[in-house]
Amino acid sequence: MLASLWQQLSDSPVPIDSVDLAWAGLAPVMILIGGALLILAVDSLVPRRLRPGSYALATVLLAAGAMVAAVPLWQRVQDAERGPFATAAGAIMVDGFSVFATFVILSAVILAALSFDGWLRREEMDGAEPYVLMLLSASGGVMMASANDLIVMFLGLEILSIAVYVLAAMHLRKITSQEAGVKYFVLGAFSSAFFLYGIALIYGGTGSTNLVRIATYLSATVLGDSGLVLAGLALLLVGFGFKVAAAPFHFWAPDVYQGAPTPSVAWMASGVKVAGFAGLLRVFYLAFSTYRLDWQPVIFVLAVLTMLVGSVLAVVQTDVKRMLAYSSINHAGFILVAVQAATAAGVQAALFYLAAYTFMVAGSFGVIAVVSRKGDIGTSLDDYRGLSRDRPVVAFAFALLLLAQAGVPLTSGFFAKFYVITAAIEAGSSTLAIIAMITAVISSYVYLRIIVAMYGAGDDVPAPRTIPLPAAAGLALVISLTVTMSVGVFPGTLASLAERATPVLIPESDPGAVDPSGVPPGP
Amino acid sequence: MDDLLLNQFLLLGAVLFCIGVYGVLARRNAVLVLMSIELILNAVNINLIAFGAFWGSITGSVFALFVIAIAAAEVGVGLAIVLLIYRNRRSVDLDDVAEMKG
Amino acid sequence: MLPTLLAELSAQNVVTTPLTQAVVLPFLGAIVVSLIPRGRAELHRVVALLFAVGTGALTLSLLAGFDRQDSGFQFQVNRVWISDFGISWHLGIDGISLFLVVLSGFLFPLAMVAVAPSHDPKPYYAWLLVLQGGCIGVFCALDLFVFFVMFEIVLVPMYFLILGWGYADRVYAALKFFIFTMFGSALMLVGIVALTFLNRDGVVEANQARVATIQSEMATVQASQGLSGPDTPVDPAIAASLAAGEARIERLLNPKLNFDLVTIAESQTVTDTSTGASPFDWGAARWIFLAFALAFAVKVPLFPLHTWLPDAHTQAPTAGSVILAGVMLKLGTYGFVRFGLYLLPEPSVFFAPALVTLGVIGIIYGAVVATMQKDLKRLVAYSSVAHLGFIILGIFALTTVSIEGGVVQMFNHGISTGALFLLVGMIYERRHTRDISSLKGLQKSAPILAAVFTLVMLSSIGLPGLNGFVGEFLVLVGSFLTRRWFTVVAAAGVVLAALYLLWAFQRVFHGEPDEENADMADMNWREGLVMAPLLVLIVFLGVYPKPMLDRIEPAVARLVSHVENHSDYTEPAVATTGVGVDAPGEDGG
């Protein structure tokens, strides 16, 4: 039967174009997806359980492998002669921006996988599924960061999200985990639907889903009625706003962060946020830069709201995961400040912030995963009292990560905030810079409350308890702390990488590469 | 395809979209919420196909096929989560699922 | 990676300069201390002391090597840190910062010797060393960015010191301290960044003339070749020179950002553009000054922003209070001098009346509230508010003598208030109370302590012949020329200071000791060793302040002429002759 089908196909009067794929450009995504499927296959085929930790190791190796595969891509796109290139008929763009985001997302995978290992064993849930889901989710994130077509952007978003819904609801014996899952799912699917509707409207308004072609169309044509495009843009912003937890689309974040398994939250707060912002930057900067004056004020308002909500509401929380959920909203607001600048410095600041924040937040949730008790409970502020005595090193590392989030100098968080407000002031938004710094002070109160709980418990310290520190979680903590502190002293390397990732996008005509607008090259 | 005909499809899409949004916001039964989300996605499909016909390109139809596949995956995961909650609580009412406050 | 980095740094001469060493050595010490295993409690103390004393010795060597004739910045080091943003590791000291660096150099080891922590020595000493490095860094920084980093970084160790080793209400006090100061500096960061951008615009503006020259030169060359417009000349040499001209224009019109304090302050490209049409029609420079002033006013603390200070001082461990009063409050007053008067002279002159008013309110308010205190430590804390008001008055009276007095007073207040906090700490250690009413007749049970207390207290009151007098006298003399009535009110503050301190002394030390106070131990030799250098300085600087004034005066005179050059302010002629320089020494001696 297959043979006859093949016969029919090859006899078909219309020749089917085979799409020209530059496989090297897709290597990181392929490694992630292939690796995930391989782990899944091994897990179902091997009769007895593998040694504990082997899935985590495999995940870390796969992510590292994908990083290695991305290095030549970085070299290629930075090479003045070769430059960025598009592949998959112009649907995927490999440029400095996408490769930088890929690196950050893969780092988040590594940190979250290290954090998962000990946590899963403590919860007696050790298995391949969380790692597989995270790898798939990461592949979606990488696709979003390199999407040059709204269809691919949407596919990436869904691959990213669906896996994360499951990661949130994963804890079978914990009702709040399922609550988190269902809330995240309903709101996430809802926002994806908005996103999709936005894409449809933009497609209707411009006749294309390809970002470069949209940009060309919009700069060449003066639309008599831009309502369709603007409405589509607004709906896209709603979709991205949900993913990065920007106010007023942040409602899910505190509940989901509190209920979901802590290592999953580490991934959500780092990788998912990076992917969301990468997509946002790409769509708004690449396709809609001509509409800058329309979206800048909207992002301005979103940024102010997000920073205020994230800092003010965090103050009244008593659960550490909830506190950090609100603080992550505040950080999203800071990144929006950079996005609002609509300059190369803004992109650089946003990328720097995302990279720095990934390590800070993944490390912080790594600590929370370690300190919590079996059943994934014990995340209230009271559970941190006396931590400086029970686990002085962990407490100190956590304090440093929290201070980094507060933006204290000699940590990466300080430079992240510095670059953001520099970009904002350069773009003439001093007001935004002032509001941003004020909210940074308000949210530093939250971090100090956690530090106070760890260090200033006073005389009524609870009885000492032993807190096991799994080796993998310790390694994750060391990595995130090392990056946070060394970037805090010598930010130049990361800043120049972020700078080299900014000249996004529209490549010069390169005969060897596929035209990014997806039109096949002429004869 | 002329503008008048396109507008009729768009209107249908918009109405379906609004019904779906209303359903997600107003319904407390998890299964009905899932259905409402499906409704929104289908509203988008109508839009995509109409726009595709308007611009005379197949992109819209191809995208609609992608959306159908993704919607199936999404609902699969959604139903699984709802089932999990039903097993624990014997209820699929979203208002019952409110352990966390703040 | 680290060895190559170190090699690179030493190749750039960064490591070998004394200022870098003085800033980095304490940080290094903190790292070393935190690497020592937890069990070796004594080792922490010894190693930390070694590093602190080493830093102190370095600062003293700076004092010895300081050229008193030179009014500019000495021991400068200037290396690129973050090239994209024009941020460089630029350090240097002049007469104004020299003594503050020395103060941070020797007050830290003294505080370490004086009090051993009750628990957890390792983090205690590590934080103290970080604090020392940060404080010295603030006083040495000649780059806005480096200054801000150091200014912010000192919050963290002080926060942890109060939180970890403070008294009952430490959590509240530590939080309040951190939030207040962080709020102040948050806006300063915006101000700094805005200033650098405005400076860049100003540089572009200033470069226009040169750009025009180059363009006309290029036009001449082109014309001589008989070319017009974009034609490329045939002669490669001429083509190259034209290209070079283009490149120069490009560079002149797109200068890099620059965070260098000296460059920005000397060029004064950011000028005030206010038209005076309405009261708040200020140019950017004034708003930027306000952003800086807020940060410094919190640190000083100026009157309405002072509420964190009594809490922080009272709850901090003794060493913390000593450092807080002795060094950290000076970060604010020093900031006003360096980043107010020097960096933004025009706005400083504009806001001087307001700041002088706040300073004088602080003098009276601090004194009155101090009189009402029941807690000895809180009383000393409020006396700091009053003393710092004097310094602010001196700085913003804008005469050479008054600013000189302010700088002298910064150093002297560090010594006498630091010593007072040490003494209060000693009393608390013995009696476990700081309540004035439950202390009585300590003169009988601890005569040496009482004698030392008397001397330090008299220095704090400003008795002629002791160091406190020199600063206050210069401030009053200098301010009288420009701010007569404020000076009169401030002089009343001196009387009030005598009142509350003597009254407190009377209640605590005089009378017959009751049962609890009768057997209080006197000072031991270790405490005496700590107090001795402070007492020597109190007397020496009171009797013979000339060496100190000689080093401070050139820098201050230069600063005042800088202010005059860049604003419409002119110093009254009488004040420039340096009336007060020798007078107090002769009067007191």
Image (cartoon, coloured by chain):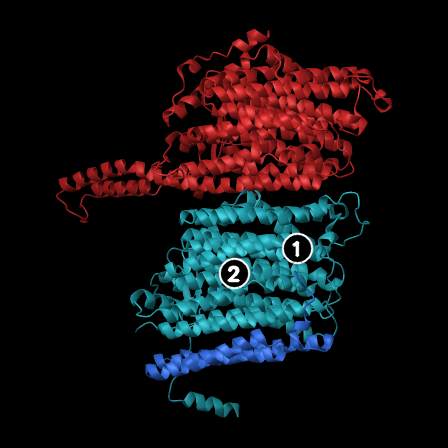
Chain colours: A cyan, B blue, C red
- Circle 1 residues within 10 Å: few <14, some 14–19, many ≥20: some
Q: Position of residue A466 (x, y in %)?
A: 79, 52
Is residue C280 visible in the rendered image? The answer is yes
| Amino acid on which the number 1 mark rests in the picture | Gln
What is the distance, in whole Å, between disc 1 and disc 2 at their CAs?
34 Å
For marks 1 and 2, the one nearer the N-term is 2
Q: How many marks?
A: 2
| Amino acid on which the number 2 mark rests in the picture | Thr
Q: In the displayed orientation, state which residue is furthest to the right.
A: C515
Q: Position of residue C502 (x, y in %)?
A: 69, 18
Q: Residue at coordinates 41% horizontally, 80% vertically from top-left?
A: B10
Residue toward you, C408 or C267: C408
In the displayed structure image, the side of residue C401 where residue C381 appears, left or right: right
Q: In the displayed orientation, state which residue is furthest to the left.
A: C226
Quadrant hosting residue C200: top left
Q: Residue at coordinates 49% horizontally, 66% vertically from top-left?
A: A238
Q: Position of residue C451 (x, y in %)?
A: 74, 14
Q: Is residue C495 above or below residue A376?
A: above
Q: Secondary structure at mark 2?
A: helix
What mark, if any, has residue A317 been given in the picture?
A: 1
Is residue C56 visible in the rendered image? The answer is no
Q: Is residue C139 above or below residue A175?
A: above
Q: Nearer the viewer, mark 1 or mark 2?
A: 1
Q: Label 2, on which residue? A: A102
Q: Secondary structure at mark 1?
A: loop
- Circle 2 residues within 10 Å: few <14, some 14–19, many ≥20: many
What mark, if any, has residue C29 been given in the picture?
A: none
Quadrant hosting residue A106: bottom right
Question: The numbered mark 1 sits on a residue in which chain?
Answer: A
